[in-house]
Amino acid sequence: MTVHLVGAGPGAPSLLTAAALDALATADVVVYDRPSLDEVVALAPPTARRIRVGLGRSRGERALPQGEVNALLIDLGRRHEHVVRLKSGDPFVASRGGEEAAALLDAGVAVRITPGVTSALAAPAAAGIPLMLRQLSVTLTIVDGNDDPEHGTPPDWAKLAALGGTLVILIGRGRIRRIAAALMAGGLAPDTPIAAISAGTRDDQQVLRGTLAALPAPLPPPVTFVVGAVAALDLTADPLPVEVVHAHP
């Protein structure tokens, strides 16, 4: 009996890994968070039980607290041969998969991790933004933008501003104005480019660009933010606006 923590990728079913498809094909139960994963959940056998534990489209719906999700996974893992816990992106990137894995192991339930493509990397790529480009940025920092102390230690935006390079912010849609102000207070210039990517890699993907002082208009969730010089680029359409030095043969 095993609980498979499976990365569902950034949204497009075509970006699922072969290992994720294999896990879904043998699932007795699939536990997932949001209706946005419905296309992926549909790849499980028709006989598999589906359990949604996150928020849906209807107002007033209640998401299960993390402790209850952990308890549910433990119970299912003790009663079923193959339980798939679908996590958006990668199970261990801003998705609490680590907490769930620790709770399952503490309860004596076997866990198998299937990595996925995190939106922190996939959404910028789909928007034509190279997160690391030698001429502009050779460092990359990924941050969980949820600064509620109940969710852990809040990010130190002043220190992150001082790092330079490219900053990718996940789960920061409702706090982006406060985050931008904190980054500017930490030393980033007001004209530092920022890109907002909604539904990255999906058919309804939207991309807006602005600066820390003039933020892009709000977009529907999920939104991935990219901060730094590369956020102004769109290599899906435009030529590279910096000189690239090619190595001699």
Image (tube, rainbow, N blue to C red):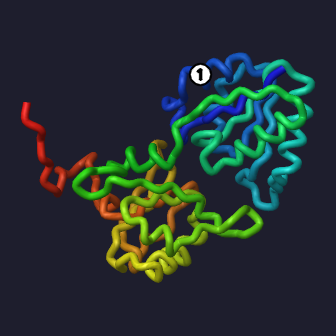
Q: Amino acid at mark 1?
A: Ala
Q: Nearer the viewer, residue 177 or 49?
A: 177
Q: Quadrant of the N terminus?
A: top right
As drawn, the residue found furthest toward the bottom would be: 185
Q: Nearer the viewer, residue 48 or 84?
A: 84
| Location of residue 84 by image quarter | top right
Residue position for label 1: 19
Q: Name the spot of residue 42 as percent of width and height, x first.
A: 67, 28
Q: Quadrant of the C terminus?
A: top left
Mark 1 neighbour class, 10 Å CA radius: few under 14, some 14 to 19, many 20 or more: some
Q: Name the spot of residue 188 as percent of width and height, x first.
A: 39, 76
Residue at 76 percent across and 38 percent down: it is 101
Residue at 39 percent across and 45 percent down: it is 126
As drawn, the residue found furthest toward the left would be: 248
Label 1 element class:
helix
Q: Nearer the viewer, residue 158 or 42?
A: 158
* Relative height, residue 191 to residue 22 (above, below): below
Residue at 31 percent across and 58 percent down: it is 230
Q: Name the spot of residue 26 as percent of width and height, x first.
A: 72, 17
Residue at 33 percent across and 50 percent down: it is 132
Residue 89 visible? The answer is yes
